Structures are given as C-alpha cells and as structure tokens.
Amino acid sequence: MKKIIVLCALVVWGSGGSVAAETDGLPDPPEAASARPSPAPFHDVELPFAQMMVKPGSMQLRGSSPEGQVEFGVRSDEVVSRAVLDLAFTPSSALIPNESQVKVYLNDEMMGMIPLSAEQMGRRSRVQIPLDPRYISDFNRLKLDFVGHYQHICENPASTTLWLDVASDSHLTLRHQKLPVKNELSYFPEPFYDSRDHRPLTLPVVFSGQPGLTQQRAAGMLASWFGTQAQWRGQDFPVLFNRLPERHGIVFATNVSRPDFLRDYPEVEGPTLEMISSPEDPYVKLLLILGRDDEDLVTAVRGLAQGSLLLRGQSVAVGGVTPLEPRQPYDAPNWIRTDRPVSFAELQTYAEQLQSTGLDPLPIALTMNLPPDLFRARERGVKMQLRYRYSAPRTADGSRLTVNLNNQFLRSYQLRPEQQRGEQFLQLLLSQDSGAGARMTIPKLRLGSSNELRFEFDYANPIIGGSPDRCESHRTIPNKVIIDGDSTVDFSGYRHFMAMPDLGAFAQSGFPFSRMADLSQTMVLVERDAGAAALQTLLNVLGRIGAHTGYPGLAVRLSDDWQAVRGQDLDVLVVGRVPDDLAGDRNVHLLLEQAQSRMAMPARQIAQAGLIPAAVDRRPETEVSMASDGVLAAMIGFQSPFHKQRSVVALLADSDRGHQLLNGALLDGGRRDEIGGSVTTVREAGVHHVRVGDIYHVGYLPWWERLWFVLSPHPVVLAVLAALSVLLMGVVLWRGLHALSRRRLSPDNEG
C-alpha cells in the first residue's frame, strides 16, 4: 500500500507540473527550476519466464489445467512505475478463432485479454500487454488463464486439441524507480539485502586502502553472514579501495584509517554500526563498520551477525559479544539433523508448502541438505514415515501418489476412494509390499549434499462428454492434497566417513570447512598485499560457505604466513597461490605462477564425477608445463601435510581475470556442477576436472566397519576369510565341547 501511495504521488506530481505549465503558458522561473527536486533514478529490469517458472521449459496450458502462473518480487526501496508483459505463445491449430482467448491477471486483477485469431492458430505469436503498476506490491503473482474451444457444443475439457504453450523466453519488463530510504537500522538487512529480490546479491565492500589481516577477517565474517541471508540466490562482493560504490555497500573504517569520503567523519569511541546516505547519491545507502582499530571492526561485525534483532536508529554502539556455547560438528542450521528423526514441518521454508490444490495439483517438494560425508556403504535405507491426506477420487481409477527423490522415481501409492476422510498413514522404511504401513528404501547412491524430495498427486479426473443429441457436462472440482507436517525422515545412526580429496563436495557444500558451521577449525591463507580481485574471491568463498551452512563463519582464522599453519590441526583454505613450501609436495598436482603453469595428468581419466578410479589409474603419469598470456584459474585439493584427517583446498588464479573466472564458476550453478576430483581448471572455454594422486579418508569408522569397508571391493578374499572364520569357530567350539565332555566323564567327578 505504501508503494501504491508513493507511485500515485509521483504520478500526480508529474501531471500537476504539466497542467500548470500548460495553463500558465510560461516557463518556470530559473529559481523555481533550480528548487525543483531532481527526479528519482530508475532502471529497467527484464524478468524471463525461464527464471520465474518452477519447472524449466515452456508453460503448458491445457483444457483440464488451463492456468499457469509466475511470481516475482519488488525490493522495498523501489517502486515499479511501468510494467509490460511480452508474451510468446503457440496455440493449437484446432481452436475456434476469437472464441478462444488468454486472460492475464496480476494479483487477481484482470489486466487484459488476448483473443486468438485465425492467423495465430498453430503458429508462434508474440504480443505485449501493459500492466497497471498500481497493483504491483512486494510479492506478486502473474496468472494466465487459457479459455479454449474446439467445437460449439458438447466439448470435452480433457480433449487433446485444447492446448496452448507459453514459451520460456516470454518476459516481464519492469521499470524500477528508486524510493528515498530512511537511515534506520531496524529494517536491516534492508536495503543492503532484500528477500523480495530473487536476483543474486551484489554488495560492494569498501576499504580505505590495502586492508590488514584483521580487517580482511572482519569483512570475511560479514560476507559469510550475508551469505546466510542470500542462500540460493548467490552472492558477490566486489572490493573497492578508497572509492564510493554506485549501489548500496559496506564501508570498513577506523579512526586512523578511513576512506577520503569519510575523512571528516567524527571519530568513534568503540565498535559502531551506522547507516548513512552516499555523499554523491542520496538514494544509495552505506553501512559503516566503524571502530578505533581493526579489532573493533571484528567486534562490530560479531554484534551485527548475532544481535541484528537489537539494531535500531541510525547508529548503534556494540558493547561486546560473549559466546556462551561452542558450536558442535555438523550442527549447521541449513543441514538436516542426523541425531534424531526430523519432521517435515522443520524442513518447511514457507507457508502452505506442504499442500496443493487444483484439478492436477502441483507437486509438493521439500529440500534436504545433508553433510556430504555420511557413510552409507552398508545401510539398508533411510527411514521415512509419511502421512498425507487427499481428496478421494470417485472410483478406483488409478489415481496415485508418486514419490521422487532428485527427479528419480522411488515408489507410487494408489489413492483409494473408500478412504474418503483422507487419513492414510504410510511408514516408508524398507523395501517390502505396499499398502498401509508400507516400507520403502531411499537408494544410497541417489543422495547428495542437496536433495529434493517431491510428492506428485496424479488424478485420473474422468470427464464425461457426450454427443450433439445428448450432451452431458460436469463441473470440475479442484482436488486438495496435503502432506502432514508430522511426517518424519530419519538420518540418525550414520557415521561420518568420506574419501578425499573431493572438490565437488567443496563446491556444493563447502566441505570440509563447513563441518564446523562457524569455521572454528578453518585457517584461510591469503597473499600479502592481495589485490581487490583476490579479496573478492576470499569474500565470495566465505559467503558461499555461509550460504551452505546458514551460519556465519565468526571463528574463521586468517594468515598470510604458511608457518602459522605448520603443525595446526586445521583445514586450510588457500586463496591466491600455493605457498613455496608446498610447491614440491607430491600431492600438489597443479601450480600457477602468473603466465607459468604446471600440471600432473593421471594414467586414465574417469568421465563420471562420482566414481573414484583405481589407484593404478590415479597415479600421476605425465607432468606438463606451459607458458601463456591466456587466462587460467584452478582449484586443487590434497591432504594436509600436518594432519592425516585434515585437508587443503587451494583456489588459484594467474590474474584478476582469472579470479573473475574462478568466482563465476563458484557462483554459477551449471559450472559449479562441473567442479570435482582433486584438480579442476577454469578457463574461458569452461570448467574441467580430473582425479590424480593419492586418496585419503576423513571421519571415523570402528575397526570392524573399516575392515568391512576395506574388504568389500574384494568378494573372493571376503568369502575366504568368512570360510576361515567359520572353520576356526568350529574348531574352537569342538575343542571346547570335547574338553567339557572329558571333564564330565573324569573319575574325579564320580559321586
């Protein structure tokens, strides 16, 4: 409502000026023209349907399911002053012209109607429909309603001739106009991060000059906190030195080291958070992280990350942050709990996620984020108890519930008409017969770091048609389906054990660093005097790990000296270049030094990323050295030389452009999926990985499970050992029974 009022005021202000000029017939005096405020800045945003639709591909509208919709949000510091729908579609050639049409709704208000002409039938068409921006709010739903006719009487709504496909390159063009924002921290993290904006977060970070390690640590902690907010959107933190950003940004400054545009700003007496307008643009806001020294900046960031609910006013002084309980391994808020069963209500991320309505209800989906090192070699399945309710079909017509995991079919269950009250409870545990209390196994090979559990209710929906002399029609009634929130899934009882190095686990879940959500067992090794591009990589990586875990890395450590890492029981993240002390390590199979590069190639490469090749195939067979002015970035993973349970992941780049490629690979979902193995190269042509060198394992298995793990790839050896064990046990039992019988028959035991 506030946005609608502001938009109307802008329209009235603009039209009022026009009317006055037309009435007076004279131009404004110079003093009046100079006093008039400058118009608010604006920018146009194009939102393709491909980004807004739940499923990729075209939107398919049918006679039995004629509605389709997309959703979009608008930031709180912007208002949409102009909106146009550019719709590309192809209708069925069997439709009756003009009687068939598409209605367009914005937030349930009709915006227009597209009559389908004879020239459009069976052909791709594109039309533009203006949308009234007064009906656009924070969260918006654009709905298309297809009204199709293929004959004048006795139509069957389920006829295959009733269809219209909306192309994925259809888009919305919105003109966003800036709104003045009050310097008020109680709205934080707005406007720096706005949950209504589904685009990747871009947040510049400003330093007065080359930051020291403590300032870099403070910025990394803050980046990881913003990563917890951005989550799936992605995040990018461009680094600026002594320069104002052109958009909302963060500024780190101390009393003795601050950018020139804050040179005359009053000194602070302790850790301080303050929100101000940019000196060059009142519509751009700056969040100042202030302190007497660099340690105060760390305290200010801790206060912001763990006490954001206390923020208010323009400025807040942070008194201190006292940790009360240490974090535990694998307790990341975004990861599903593995110490007890978890209800579906705990996995729910928005209201009404567990229910759906319609003639063909949309699938119900839940996301399960798991630690990548769950050991599932011998388990028989993941326990899941599923409870659901549904509108009962009229007859036993084959309507069913289908359960899918990561787009792979698991099991289907019939929706029975006799259960009209919709109370059916299933327990999905092990592979047995279906029915009430049925059991099901989630195959271990189909589980990853992020998993989508999807429930599809498919109704047969019989629709009676007829003939022209006896036409019968039935009003379609939408079906209602609900997955009960007290349904549970149980991953408890699994141990943590994993083969390393695995750069795929790092790219997809931040492992092994994310094992501790606060990064308390992580050391980040950076270059001395790192440039803005290298610092941007550092902030982006820490932000990405925060997005995986849902908790800021407030305990991360930074160093620019490899000697500080020596002997430490820590996982090490290297940003920039491999230390000289490691250059000769036999596990370091790729090195970058500006234009020079060296890489070891394995004897045989395995195409499938999830498979670990045999040792003979992983051994380094060839070492290649090259020099080029072209751009190259890389990631390598290997075992820490100081602790067999610790890992080193190095992010390498030969130039600023190399860091850009590295950031692009980590932020783009498609390219991120190509990261894996022990060595990954990132070039202009794309991302490629290989697995070369030794394999090591992190985690814990008791000796009997480790023995089984070692012997399981060798069934013949396992069978021989099993036979020897049975034989040995038989000999021991025979000798024991023989000794017992002799003792009982001994003359000393008579009487």
Image (tube, rainbow, N blue to C red):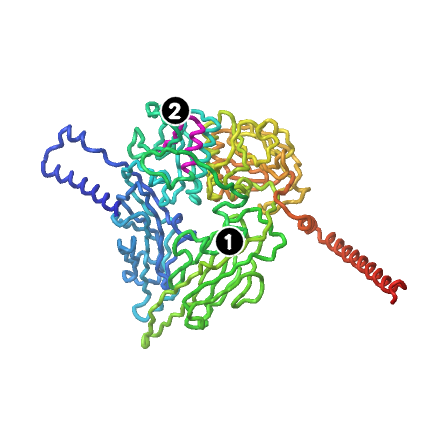
| Spot occupied by residue 705 in the image (x, y as percentages of width and height) | 66, 50
Query: What stretch of residues is rendered in magenta?
Result: 286-304
For label 2, the residue is 255
Name above or below for residue 17 compared with residue 214: below
Q: Residue type at mark 1?
A: Asn
Residue 355 vs residue 717: left or right?
left
Residue 119 counted in the magenta span: no
Name above or below for residue 709 compared with residue 396: above
Q: Quadrant of residue 392?
A: bottom left
Judge the density around disc 1: few (<14), some (14-19), many (≥20) Cα neighbours within 10 Å: some
- Tell me, for residue 406, which label it has, or none: 1
Residue 151 vs residue 545: left or right?
left
Residue that lies at the very extreme toward the left in this rendered image: 24
Q: Quadrant of residue 532?
A: top left
Q: Are marks 2 and 1 in contact (CB under 8 Å)?
A: no
Looking at the rendered structure, the secondary structure element under dot 1 is: loop
Looking at the rendering, in which quadrant would you find the C terminus? Answer: bottom right
Residue that lies at the very extreme toward the right in this rendered image: 747
Between residue 649 and residue 173, name the one nearer to us: 649
Q: Residue at x 48, y 35 (%)?
A: 661
Between residue 601 and residue 142, name the one nearer to us: 142
- Tell me, for residue 745, which label it has, or none: none
Looking at the rendered structure, the secondary structure element under dot 2 is: loop
Q: Earlier in the sequence, mark 2 or mark 1?
A: 2
Q: Nearer the viewer, mark 2 or mark 1?
A: 2
